[in-house]
Amino acid sequence: MVALLGICGSLRRASLNRALLQAVAENLPADSTMQLLDGALDLPIFNSDQVEPAAVTHLKDTMRAADGIVFAVPEYNYSIPGGLKNALDWISRPVVASPLRGKPCALIGAASGMSGTIRAQTHMRHILVFSDSPCMNQPEVLIPRAQERFDAEGKLNDESTRALLVRFGATFAAFVQRHKPG
Amino acid sequence: MVALLGICGSLRRASLNRALLQAVAENLPADSTMQLLDGALDLPIFNSDQVEPAAVTHLKDTMRAADGIVFAVPEYNYSIPGGLKNALDWISRPVVASPLRGKPCALIGAASGMSGTIRAQTHMRHILVFSDSPCMNQPEVLIPRAQERFDAEGKLNDESTRALLVRFGATFAAFVQRHKPG
Amino acid sequence: MVALLGICGSLRRASLNRALLQAVAENLPADSTMQLLDGALDLPIFNSDQVEPAAVTHLKDTMRAADGIVFAVPEYNYSIPGGLKNALDWISRPVVASPLRGKPCALIGAASGMSGTIRAQTHMRHILVFSDSPCMNQPEVLIPRAQERFDAEGKLNDESTRALLVRFGATFAAFVQRHKPG
Amino acid sequence: MVALLGICGSLRRASLNRALLQAVAENLPADSTMQLLDGALDLPIFNSDQVEPAAVTHLKDTMRAADGIVFAVPEYNYSIPGGLKNALDWISRPVVASPLRGKPCALIGAASGMSGTIRAQTHMRHILVFSDSPCMNQPEVLIPRAQERFDAEGKLNDESTRALLVRFGATFAAFVQRHKPG
């Protein structure tokens, strides 16, 4: 069994990226499950002068327990959301004990424009080099005009996107298996 | 006169990047001044479902009033601090009225390692393309082994760094003048 | 008058990026002209052990004479073409005398997919930071599904793209004027 | 046994990056070997209108036969050398049959300045996402002030660098093993 964790970079209730993450969860192979975190990024701004908040410790434990992590990465200002980056700043300390170290990761993103979060995902890949997290290359999930692919309840209604997500889930489950310790 | 604003990406009290920004302020040409913001990044995580906090409105007004902005960009996890990105996410909305639109910017950064925040500044430059902010190319201020260049009170004690900052300040003041409207 | 130089990163005869550059040239404001270079990138691979080829010296002179340069940047392998990069490697030496130093630049790109050369243009922007070349931020010209926008002779037949190019040309002409020395 | 291929991005005879690659080859674990390519990047500029040169076909075959590839990536103009990129443009076609597809890769780089080729390696990592090549994250080999670490014959004479290369070689050999098909 492969136990995945899904983290959405947006705090918006009607986030298209959360809807996309939900669609990934619904299209995983039979041997895989995904837990979706909600509200986990609603943290104070990282400040190394301060004691680690309990919510950060909890987030670290949850990440550590997962076999692999899928990040849904909205693009704000040509980069990843500050809230997502802030959570990474908290959980990456101390560096040697980061829950991301060696953790298999994959990225997805949805946008209303044509770029499909290319720039944000590029930044996120840099960040995962620092934490020495194997990050799946392909298939990339870069969804342009995402608002046309989900209904009013946030359900995916585009079959080509669903086929991509099925392939993404199967490839990532195998990727996680390959990187399992031992 | 050129009225600059200095924004430090770190909230730490003993931040080397704040010390570097202070050193820039102390080595500006005679026709220029710099106001240093303190605590301005200590904001809630951006959520477009929520009303803009008063602190964000104040930050926008302060940025709008400046002739140019110097960002001190620490590098966390190979990118800019989440707190700095989060502030940019707040102030960039609505996009057409962003206080960064057309605002001359420049970057500085200090790190304890050898890279001198190269990766973080690269990400920050992407972000400023989105906001259509002219960002000075050279001289780049990428300070490696920064802890060896400041004393216990955060005062710069390295003359080659000071010479660089003098050149940086003079070049940026001219850059801001060139980009003044009208 | 503003005398622009257009450099296409592709050597293909039927290059969509050359067609796009041609369309820029045909939609410039009245006070501007653009010379399109052909075959200028067909150079030996850069090797600092070798003497500068005459074609490189000629390219440098041509770039130096221009008021501004428009680079059409195809995306190969998520970056700029090797041939374009190789030409930049030749002309950038010696660094202090690079014809790109201080030269106003702008980027355009066309692709058959959805990304419109976003990644290639991002790399090109980094490169122009090194050469201290002011590079226009906006409007970005990132043309997805470009093959649907040109006819068999390479003539632009899409009015929304033409409107973007008109705005691009006018904005870049003003950008070049602002950066003129003296 | 792990049979590695080493490709140096510079054509210079006295290239520090070739010296670094040679030092990697001399410090591999007992079960690994590395073949160093010489002159393989001295190709015509890529042009999809032209027939693939025999040297490109040979390079593809050599890459395909290797278990993993180490790229020595000098930094020219804040990116990878045009000659290296040009070789990648040739060998990556057709995309589905690229010899880089699924091929384990690792990066090293040496520079005379402080950055140690950070920017060039970042671009190279993007490129390897396109070709779906697993690229080792850590340890990164970013050698600043490289001219102080090699003698006049290009022999490594810095023990901390040698220790890094030993760790690099052992980690990459294991990385290649993990990614072996079947």
Image (spheres, coloured by chain):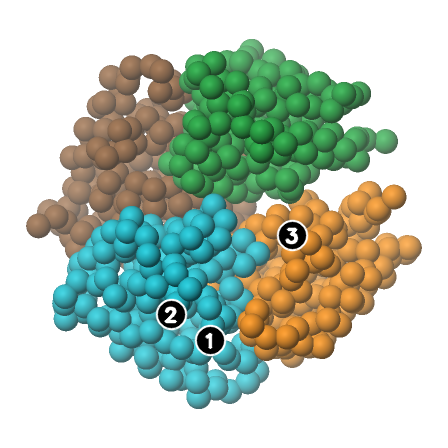
Chain colours: A cyan, B orange, C green, D brown
Q: Position of residue B176 (x, y in %)?
A: 80, 49
Q: Is residue B171 visible?
A: yes
Q: Which residue is mark 3?
A: B131
Q: Which residue is mark 1?
A: A41
Chain under label 3?
A: B
Chain under label 1?
A: A
Q: Amino acid at mark 2?
A: Ile
Q: Position of residue C124 (x, y in %)?
A: 54, 37
Vertical placement of residue B174 versus C157, above or below: below
Q: Is residue D73 visible?
A: no
Q: Residue at (57%, 69%) from the top-left corner?
A: B48
Horizontal side, residue C33 vs residue A52: left or right: right
Q: Position of residue C71 (x, y in %)?
A: 57, 28
Q: Residue furthest top?
A: C54
Q: Residues within 10 Å of mark 2 (few under 14, many from 20)?
A: many
The quarter of the picture where residue A49 lies is bottom right
